[in-house]
Image (cartoon, helix red, strand yellow):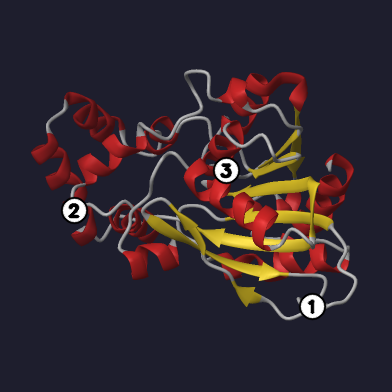
Amino acid sequence: MPSPPSPCPARAKNFTVEAIWYPQQAENTNQPKQLQTLILGQGFDAAQEDLYSTLVAPALARGWNIISCEGPGQPTVRRFQGLGFVPDWERVVTSVVDYLLNEKAAFVDPQRLALFGNSLGGYLDARAAAFEPRLSALLLDGGVWDMYDGYKGHSTPALAELLESGDQEAFDNEMNAIQSNPNATTELKWGILQGLWAFKTHSPYYFFQQTKNYTLKGGIADMIQMPTWIADGECDATFPGHSEMVKDALGDRAALHIFKGTAGFHCQTGAPQELGRVLVCLAESNT
């Protein structure tokens, strides 16, 4: 590392964004330079540290400052502040941008400030970018058009019908029974439990109802004005078709990149070095 990282909590209204600052220069340098800076955001479950080898290290090697962050519903803020996810993610990102342009102004070029959203961050950080014009570029891996539609699509037709019926008790009973069903996949069982924990609810029905607020519909996508790069994987079935929907909504402001082969799974799990290589090059060309 060019300089040791440090925790840098950024104050937002009613919560603190837990962030890690990875600078190119030491804080006590006599000749600070304003450099391009990349804000990294995670999604539904992963910790910010998970992005170190994938994105932090290659971006540092190319001369970028990095700041990774977690907001409500994400690991540190959920555990230590007891806060579940919020749909208006600009509350998180704007606090980080304010922090960078005030506390780190000597090191951050305000004209070259990019935002990356990973997994569900494809909604969270896209939403934030719609309300944060100080960003020069937006990078999404991948796009999330509507969380409710995406998650409901993983339900069986019978469960989807029960969810749409509005019968909370019956839906909760069916979803809770999955935990003791030996034929249910570990992925499904974990997904339900993670959703309840991250959204701070005991009701699967209420979890699904909350996800209706996590959408780029209703003109939100139209407010994203900076150049946007959207990734998708040919084998990624998490939010199928959503990256294309986000690209279509943004039109010429966005480019869609399809990863293939071992990099074609969700968030390039099989070949994360491919994500780092492509994303850092694109971030440089768009900031």
| Amino acid at the residue labelled 3 | Asp
Locate residue 83: give its quadrant: bottom left
Secondary structure beneath disc 3? helix
Q: Between 191 and 74, which is closer to the camera in this rendering?
A: 74
For the point 67% across and 60% down, the residue is 270
Taking 86 as reference, is 255 left or right? right
Q: Is residue 6 above or below residue 190?
A: below
Q: Where does the image place residue 159, in percent across and percent down from the top left?
A: 24, 35
Q: Is residue 134 above or below residue 84?
A: above
Q: Which residue lies under the disc numbered 3?
A: 125
Q: Which residue lies under the disc numbered 2?
A: 202
For the point 16% across and 28% down, the residue is 166
| Amino acid at the residue labelled 1 | Ala
| Labels 2 and 1: the sequence-earlier one | 1
- Given the current orientation, which residue lies at the most extreme left position? 169
| Amino acid at the residue labelled 2 | His
For the point 15% across and 44% down, the residue is 172
